[in-house]
Image (cartoon, coloured by chain):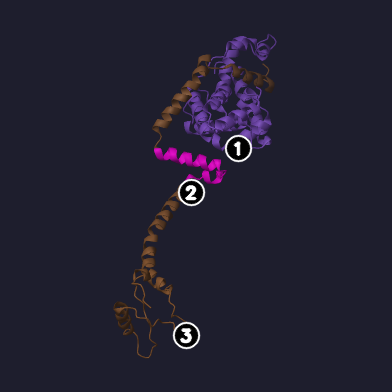
Chain colours: A brown, B purple
Amino acid sequence: MDPLSEEQIGKLLRLKKYEQPPPAYFENFLHEFHRRQRDELLREPVWRIALQRTQDFLFRLNIPGLASYPALATALVICAAVISLKVYQTPETVNVAAQNRTPVVATTSLPNSNWSLSNPVTTRDLGPSLVRTVKDSSKTHRVAAPPRYVLDSTPVSYEAAFRF
Amino acid sequence: MEQPRSDEDQQLVARTQAGEAAAFDELVVKYTPRLYGLVYNMTSNHEDTNDLLQDIFSKAYKSIGGFRGKSSFYTWIHSIAVNMTLNFLKKRGRRFHLSLDDMDGSVQNDKEFLELTATTSPVREADLSELQRRLNESMMKLSDEHRAVVTMFHIQGMPHAEISKILKVSEGTVRSRLFYANRQLQNYLDEFRKNPVS
């Protein structure tokens, strides 16, 4: 008995393409595929759907490298969330400091016709409340030190109009 | 087996990527019989083939957004199919039973079938079905990688270059796997023909 040649084995193998399921199988396959897809969607947790959507989005942005590392993408999202939380919290303290400083800044813009470089401190009658504040404030300094005047923190716009 | 037109596939892929699910359905209908042959001849089990095919198309649908067209859709979907089937076979191990589909009636008109069953041929029609059964058993004795190459080359009629792209190995590796697999099949079948009762 002659051994089977490689060619004959090839022919035998090619006959295997006739091993096919019944034609109805291919007709139903698509229907079955749709049914399984729906089932999968129903069973899938929300976070996974969200992750897949993020990956798809990154792919559309042509960042496949990043999208192929879901852990990295998740880490970036968490970092962004933490940073944004910090940013929202920080302005509260900044605003308080700014509010404290505001009156001092406002006094520098006081329109004063008697003001000059040789006499930078006003000699006008600033009213009893402001005078008292200046005296109290001057006690905090040493005698040798030149006198420093601290203006009241009340905004200028709230003071009574000056009389000339 | 001829490769489908890739420009037609490209259009269907582009439509799917644009969100038209019906375009992907067309790809499923087009590639199911071809991929069925590939997966079925690697697993030799109809139920496993059916489950795997569903998973393959499901994975393809989920990943099609990332398909950039560097290879043809034909190569891409075959790569998914082969890789998923090889992974499945690794998990399944040797626990399987052959549930082979019957040969289609059109085999009677096949030129090669007629040649094989001709009176001058060493293979007679009477023992052809038995030989086919033995061939299937012999196929399952091959390693998964060798079976994949035999299936793609002999049964699906793919050229070496296409197989090397799908498996991401060199053409030389494809040829050497094919040579080794053919030798093994030859040995198994000759053994059967010498001792048909074994």
- Residue A118 image label: 3
Residue B40 disc label:
none
Q: Locate residue A38 relative to residue A17 in the image: left or right.
A: left
Per the model, the C-alpha gap separating discs 1 and 2 is: 22 Å
Which quadrant holds residue A47? top left
Residues under numbered marks 3 and 2 in contact, where contact means CB atoms less than 8 Å apart:
no
Q: Which of the chains bears the disc numbered 2?
A: A
Name which of mark 3 and mark 2 comes first in the sequence: 2
Viewer-proximal residue among B194 and A85 = A85
Same subunit: marks 1 and 2: no
Q: Position of residue B65 (x, y in %)?
A: 55, 36
Identify the chain of the residue marked 3, using the numbered disc in the image: A
> Identity of the amino acid at label 2?
Leu
How far apart are the two marked residues, 1 and 3, measured between alpha carbons? 77 Å
Q: Position of residue B35 (x, y in %)?
A: 57, 25
Q: Nearer the viewer, residue B189 or B129?
A: B129
Residue at the spot of label 1: B68
What amino acid is at disc 3?
Ser
Mark 1 closeness class: few <14, some 14–19, many ≥20 residues within 10 Å: few
Q: Mark 3 or mark 2: which is in front?
A: 3
- Work out whether residue A22 can be spotted: no
Disc 1 marks a residue whose amino acid type is Arg
Q: Which marked residue is nearer to the observer: mark 1 or mark 3?
A: 3
- Residue at the spot x=61%, y=29% of the render? B11
Is residue B164 rendered magenta in the image? no
**Residue identifier under label 2:** A72
Look at 30% across and 82% down and name the residue there: A136
Q: Secondary structure at mark 1?
A: loop
Instruction: Give how far apart the Cα atoms at labels 3 and 2 are.
Output: 65 Å
Magenta residues (range)? A46-71
Residue plotted at (34% across, 75% down): A152
Residue closer to the observer: A130 or A141: A130
